[in-house]
Amino acid sequence: DVQLVESGGGSVQSGGSLKLSCTGSSVPFRQSQLGWYRRVPGDNCELIATLTSGAGTDYRQSVRGRFTISRENAKNELNLQMNSLRPEDTAVYYCAAGGLLAPRAYCRSARGYWGQGTQVTVS
């Protein structure tokens, strides 16, 4: 069974916006870190945004100032607002949860919780 479920992906023009959402059971949302990865060449995922309990948010340099990560605890929901999208943002995006999310990881690895991925295409 899928541990987390993403939605909101799609195709947009350069400079446009999309909001991704991630939902799941209470277990992954009790983890100390929640975040969003995107797939990169080489069959790997890079961590682009994190929300750490008691420590706020952090972003990869390439998306800083353009993307915003947030959560709604009452709904077990994690969101990623993406603005000023660029063609290089095109990728499959995954939400994830764990005790400590690695900056680089194999997409949907056995460690932690992962969604199935949602495609974002910017042209």
Image: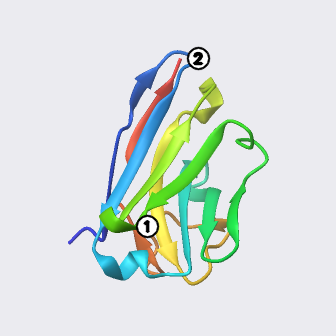
- Give the mark, 2 or 1, whose residue is nearer the N terminus: 2
Q: Secondary structure at mark 2?
A: loop
Q: Residues within 10 Å of mark 1 (few under 14, many from 20)?
A: some
Q: Residue 57 location, x and y as percent?
A: 67, 61
105 w.r.t. 79: above or below? below
- The figure's colour scheme reads rainbow
In the rendered image, which residue does mark 1 sit on? 108
Q: Residue 4 location, x and y as percent?
A: 32, 65
Q: Secondary structure at mark 1?
A: loop
Disc number placed over residue 67 in the picture, else none: none
The residue closer to the viewer here, 110 or 94, is 94
Q: Nearer the observer, disc 2 or disc 1? A: 2
**The residue under label 2 is which amino acid type?**
Ser
Q: Is residue 116 visible?
A: no
Residue 30 figure quarter: bottom left
Task: Name the residue at 45% across, 55% down.
Answer: 94
Task: Name the residue at 47% across, 28% down.
Answer: 121
Estimate the spatial distance between the alpha carbons at disc 2 and disc 1, rounded to whole Å.
28 Å
Residue furthest out toward the front: 74
Task: Name the residue at 47% across, 59% down.
Answer: 71
Disc number placed over residue 14 in the picture, else none: 2
Task: Name the residue at 54% across, 20% down.
Answer: 16
**The residue under label 1 is which amino acid type?**
Arg
The residue closer to the viewer here, 5 or 51, is 51
Residue furthest out toward the right: 61
Q: Quadrant of the N terminus?
A: bottom left
122 w.r.t. 92: above or below? above
